Amino acid sequence: MLYSQAVLHSVPELKEFVSLARYTTLQIGGPARLFAEVSTEDEVAAVAGFAKKHGMPLFVLGGGSNVLVSDSGFDGLVMRVAVRFSIRERSDGEMVLVEAGAGESWDGFVRYAVDRGFAGVECLAGIPGDVGGTPVQNVGAYGQEVSETIVRVRAYDMVAGEFVELDRAACGFGYRRSVFNSEARGQYVVTSVTYRLRPGGEPALRYADLKNHFSARLEAGEKPSLREVYDAVRSIREAKGMLAGQGGPDGRSAGSFFKNPVVPKAALDRIVATLIIPAERIPHWPEGEDMVKLPAAWLLEQARFFKGFEMGEVGISSRHTLAFINRGHATAAEMVALRNAIQRRVKAMFGIELEQEPVGLGF
Ligand SMILES: Cc1cc2nc3c(=O)[nH]c(=O)nc-3n(C[C@H](O)[C@H](O)[C@H](O)COP(=O)(O)OP(=O)(O)OC[C@H]3O[C@@H](n4cnc5c(N)ncnc54)[C@H](O)[C@@H]3O)c2cc1C
């Protein structure tokens, strides 16, 4: 559809045919029919109102670190949320409530918290993207998830046409899940998030990689500081090519391409039968009574997809089995072909469906 200049000028932020590749960490994808970068709540409401009035599909973009855009792009309006303001703090008994604008860099926010001695997000250092994307995907790593600390999400409700505030229960958090990416997908534009953090709290050391990093200190009865844990997480992530802003050949990725599958315990029997190995050698964690979570990276390796695997212009990072990379001039079609090939083989071998983690746009 063509829009007259008068219509387009009714919302000053709107631009036409903007390439989305440069707004995503994969650097793949065609143009958005309309694109608007918004930095205030008024602009959010105006752009959302425009999309509603003209019946245009709207996609909300943060840092673009968990998105795969199709080669034909998106025949709708992409709203890039860049709402930033000075981080606001308020005490809450022994805790502190810290509110950050959706467009703030997530790693910058973690550093802010750590510098002030606020515990609760230190293990989430070095994850790319913005604050606004963290409740959507319930971002997690190294034993922490944002659902443990988020107490309030402020958002524009596209259905009600007004700003609303959701508490933790209303966010419906699960593993890489929230209402924002499931039943209410597309309904909310997050403009700020409030985290409840513990001043002077101890860092979380739940994850094996982190405990190993500090093993000598822990054996000597010493606890690392928040800042040391922040630095350690960043250096572990860097070694895996998973650090925010990291360049190099493994830098063009969307992080883990598959979620770790949660399957009935009985699924382990099929793996035992296929690989002819004892169940104890299958890495897994209990999820409730009858389910287990399996590391997707391990399944890929059993299916003979290893680090450094190449398929034309796409491939698997040389440092992380789950990070699929754009080797230079990749298309979304090639990325989808790699995904399908892996999903097919894992399904055929183990009967397990791997679910894509990055959000697809324009497919
Ligand atoms: C190298 C690398 C490592 C990563 N490591 C991890 C990790 O350890 N753990 C982890 O959980 N994730 C990880 N990720 C994935 C990604 O960084 C997170 O999911 C991140 O929170 C996405 O934020 P974003 O701002 O880039 O969102 P985008 O990629 O722009 O968007 C992701 C989804 O959130 C929605 N969204 C974004 N902002 C808003 C908003 N303001 N309002 C409403 N909806 C919004 C989008 O519509 C989309 O559905 C990694 C990614 C990369 C590239």
Image: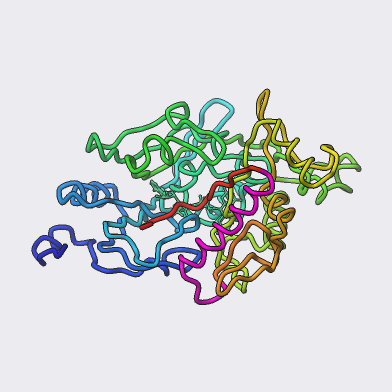
Q: Quarter-wise, where is residue 107 in the image?
A: bottom right
Please, is residue 67 above or below residue 246 in the view?
A: above
> Which residue is outermost to the top?
289
Q: How many marks?
A: 0
Q: Main secondary structure of the magenta part?
A: helix
Model colouring = rainbow
Magenta-span inclusion, residue 271? no
Q: Is residue 244 left or right of residue 172?
A: right
Q: Nearer the viewer, residue 40 or 66?
A: 66
The answer to which quarter of the image holds residue 19 is bottom left
At 19% from the left and 46% from the top, the residue drawn is 52
Residue depicted at x 74% and y 53%: 302
Asked if residue 329 lies in the magenta stretch, the reply is yes
Relative to 185, is 344 above or below?
A: below
Q: Name, please, the residue furthest toward the right.
A: 220
| Residue 255 in the image, given as x and y percentages of width and height | 58, 57
What residue appears at the point 32 percent right and 60 percent down from the top-left corner? 74
Residue 177 x/y as whole percent = 50, 38
- Note whether 108 is above or below 279 in the view shown: below
- Along the viewing direction, whichever of 295 and 342 lies nearer the viewer: 342
Quadrant the C terminus occupies: bottom left
Image-based side of 126 in relation to 337, left or right? right
Q: Position of residue 288 (x, y in %)?
A: 66, 26
Q: Which residues are magenta?
A: 327-350
Quarter of the image with the N terminus in it: bottom left
Residue 279 or residue 160, whichever sits in front = 279
Residue 234: image x %, image y %?
A: 67, 57
Residue at position x 68%, y 40% in the image: 143
